[in-house]
Image (cartoon, grey):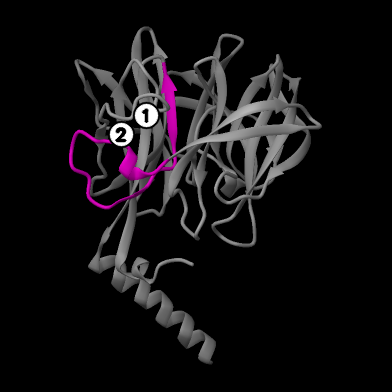
Amino acid sequence: MASPLRMFTKTEYAVAVRFSDRDLLTDRRSPFSVLAPDEDYWYADPFPYKRDGRYYVFMEMMKKDAGYAGIGMSEYRDGAWTHPRMVIDTGSHLSFPLLFERGGKLYMMPESCAEGCVQVFACERFPDAWRRETVVLDGAFSDSVPFEWEGEPYLFTSKGTDDMYGNELFLFALRPEGGLWKARAGRSVSKDYRVSRMAGKVLPSGGKTYRVAQDCSRADYGRALVFSQILSCSPQQYTERQTLRLAPRDVRTAQPLRGKAGIHTYNRLDDLDVIDFKLCTFSLKSTVQKFRIVAGMLLHRGR
């Protein structure tokens, strides 16, 4: 059950980054530096990218006044990360900007659940010119992650259940089409709220391969990260073993970060780790807005 204290808090997200020789499975002591929310935006769902020896982080960039997000980007320059700037704004909510290269081209598969499909954008000019390339899968799916297992392409993706915090994890086989893919045979592989929504790319570590999920149990979206080793994967069978759960208290930050209440994304590229934190803090403005919503619903119900 959701805590009644949520009535008095606002929820925002902050991206955090670090350079480390080891990933989060084996190094939980090296601290992350935080890209904190500002007056206009908060930041989540970080995905790293490297081009011409330079690091970039693409992320969900929530426009507080508009109530939807576009895709933002920060660059590591002269020993510091630049302030994030918007690179994709379609007027519809986008998040989880998963990046991949195929055929020498850069693509992005962001969450576009609001548009009712899993789509791919192609980069026409790096980093801020993108166009819709294709639809991989129709339906309101979230946080989709393509990956390969034994040379065959697959797609993890999640779909919401009747409970707003619930998700069902699906595994689709992919078939090549037009230089990319189309989803074909798919099956449900988990309805466990603790592991049924993706939290980043599939992670190779120590000769093993891990699926990174977010814990959405107890009616609480993105409470923690859960790492599960993939044991087998085919259109007919999927098995994994949970190996580690990381809550916000398990991850250190270089700066004090007030209201850490969850983690819901982790990715790694070379020696760069990126993560995000859910922040829940008291907000008088948010409390007043929520009371107005509840009062309006009660008045409507009483008519």
Check residue 274 in the rendering and tell me which mark sits there, or answer none.
1
Give residue 234's position: percent from left, percent from top.
Answer: 76, 27
Q: Residue at x 37, y 29 (%)?
A: 274
Q: Does the stretch in magenta take in 264?
A: yes
Q: Residue at x 50, y 43 (%)?
A: 214
Task: Work out whether residue 128 or residue 71 is closer to the camera in this orientation and state it.
Answer: 71
As drawn, the residue found furthest toward the bottom would be 303
203 versus 193 height, above or below: above
Give residue 43's position: percent from left, percent from top.
Answer: 34, 41
Task: Work out whether residue 89 or residue 1 is closer to the camera in this orientation and state it.
Answer: 1
Task: Work out whether residue 175 or residue 84 is closer to the camera in this orientation and state it.
Answer: 175
In terms of image quadrants, where is residue 146? top right
94 versus 204 height, above or below: below
Check residue 37 in the rendering and tell me which mark sits there, or answer none.
none
Q: Does the stretch in magenta take in 218?
A: no
**How many numbered circles are shown?**
2
Helix, strand or loop status at disc 2:
strand
**Residue position for label 2:** 16
Mark 2–mark 1 CB contact (< 8 Å)? yes
Give residue 136's position: percent from left, percent from top.
Answer: 69, 32
Left or right for 131, reference 162: left
* Residue type pointed to by label 1: Val
Q: Which residue range is magenta in the image?
A: 246-269
Give residue 121's position: percent from left, percent from top.
Answer: 56, 28
Task: Work out whether residue 194 or residue 98 is closer to the camera in this orientation and state it.
Answer: 194
Query: Going from the N terminus, do you reach mark 2 or mark 1 first?
Result: 2
Q: Residues within 10 Å of mark 2 (few under 14, many from 20)?
A: many
Q: Residue at x 33, y 12 (%)?
A: 54
* Residue type pointed to by label 2: Ala
Question: Does residue 92 show up?
Answer: no
